Image (cartoon, grey):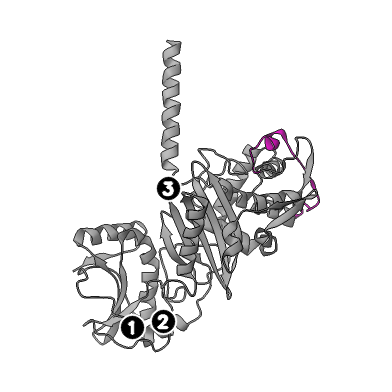
Amino acid sequence: MLLIRRIMAFVFVAGAFLSISRTAEAGYAHYIYDVQSGKVLSSQNAETLNHPASLTKMMTLYLTFEALRTGRLRWDDKVVMTSNAASKIPFKLGVPAGQTITVREAVYGMAIRSANDAAAAMGDHLGGSEDRFGVLMTKKARQLGMRSTVFRNASGLPDDAQVTTARDMAVLALSLIRDYPREYKIFSQRSFSFRGRTIKGHNNLMYRYPGMDGIKTGFVNASGYNLASAVDVNGRRVIGVVLGGKTARQRDNRMAELLDQALPGGAALPGVAVATSGQQKRPAEGVANLASKAPVPRPRTEIILGGTTATAAAVTPYATVPKGAPVQNMIQPGTPLWDIQIAAAGSQAAAAGALNSALPLLSDFGQIAPSVQGSSSSGREVFRARLTGFADRDAAARACSVLQTRSIDCFVVR
């Protein structure tokens, strides 16, 4: 009987392990966010759970910077390398248990070399134990707006219950840049000196991508190759997260490709077409004027990424259209005739804003074109915000269901 109970217990634990592993593996995800405009430029599996790997150290560093600012820590304070910390696998600083490192050495070790022993030592120091520090990390994650993340350790080493999403990691990256801009600059350094030796970093994409000034790489078998990146080009800040790359090179190349599309000089992003009710081409004055307006930053009291509502003051079109350029009619010959209407707005800007909120949520539906159709009704001009290009009614209905789960009203139009 005892043997049977042990076997049943083993089966239960193994089943639970497999269940957790399946629910916490996105395979691949990305999230590209424009900080100034508050727009999600590209998104795939961004809310699906995955393991953060060493991106976890971004939160360990956030809490370290917070302790430095409040006076709980000073840069030259000594941190004991506990037995727990010293036992971590490389990458590590390699300081024996019982000896100490400074807070500065721990920070540089985490940010540049992704040292697991430095992260665990800091977790033990700030939390009393790494387990308790994981609770503090998760609490801070909720305060910052990271909806789905659970932290269990300070380093990102494997733990089935330690999960995050691409969106949440973008929130954390933005929080570091916003709240600790001076300390954030450490992420841009290629190496640091540690007790007579030079320790080099391995954020290789940052060393070759113009304008990239951070932030963190990560890898464990369960997650694949992860990367959070931040780019500042001519004052335009874009944050990108890629999770689940098959190799470090493939992950880096994918991030570069996504950023090329988002930044000036890259591939064109979807634009907002403006047409009359008869689908006739006309000059793009409305689009050009809207695109030329400086976007209004979101309030700094909280971070909202991928919101489901928008106003004309908070968004701009996806593509910047040169003033006076003709609008390209996005309804090409042979295009399927099934659309989704998501708004009938009183202004062109409000209709464009509704499209900016909805389009990133439908990245799995192929080539979908945004369209703003203007018409007059009872002497009042109305702008209908529609997404066009669905192969059939079922595809349009499925897309509409996706939007409705995110509180965006819509209906299918032939």
Q: Residue at x 59, y 57 (%)?
A: 204
Q: Circle 1 sits on which residue? A: 327
In depth, the one of 232 and 260 nearer the eye is: 260
Above or below 367: residue 127: above
Q: Residue at x 45, y 27 (%)?
A: 13
Q: Which residues are magenta?
A: 70-91
Residue kind at label 1, given as amino acid type: Val
For residue 190, which numbered disc appears in the image?
none
Q: CA distance from mark 1 to mark 2?
A: 9 Å
Q: Which residue is mark 3?
A: 26
Q: Earlier in the sequence, mark 1 or mark 2?
A: 2
x, y percent for residue 340:
26, 67
Whole-number angstrom distance, CA of label 1 to CA of label 3? 38 Å
Q: Is residue 353 above or below residue 227?
A: below
For residue 262, say whether it is visible.
yes
Sequence-first tag of 3 and 2: 3
Residue appearing at x 49%, y 45% in the figure: 223
Which amino acid does the dot numbered 3 rest on? Answer: Ala
The residue identified by callout 2 is 321
Residue 232 vertical placement versus 15 (above, below): below
Residue in the foreground of this view, choosing between 209 and 296:
209
Q: Quadrant of the C terminus?
A: bottom left
- Dot 1 and dot 2 residues touching (CB under 8 Å): yes
Horizontal side of residue 252 vs 74, given as left or right: left
Which residue is nearer to you in this view: 267 or 374?
Answer: 267
Q: Tell me if 93 is positioned left or right of 266 in this view.
A: right
Q: Quadrant of residue 71?
A: bottom right
Q: Nearer the viewer, residue 73 or 56?
A: 56
Q: Position of residue 56 (x, y in %)?
A: 58, 48
The kind of secondary structure the magenta stretch mainly shows is: loop
Could you tell me residue 58's position as x and y percent?
61, 52
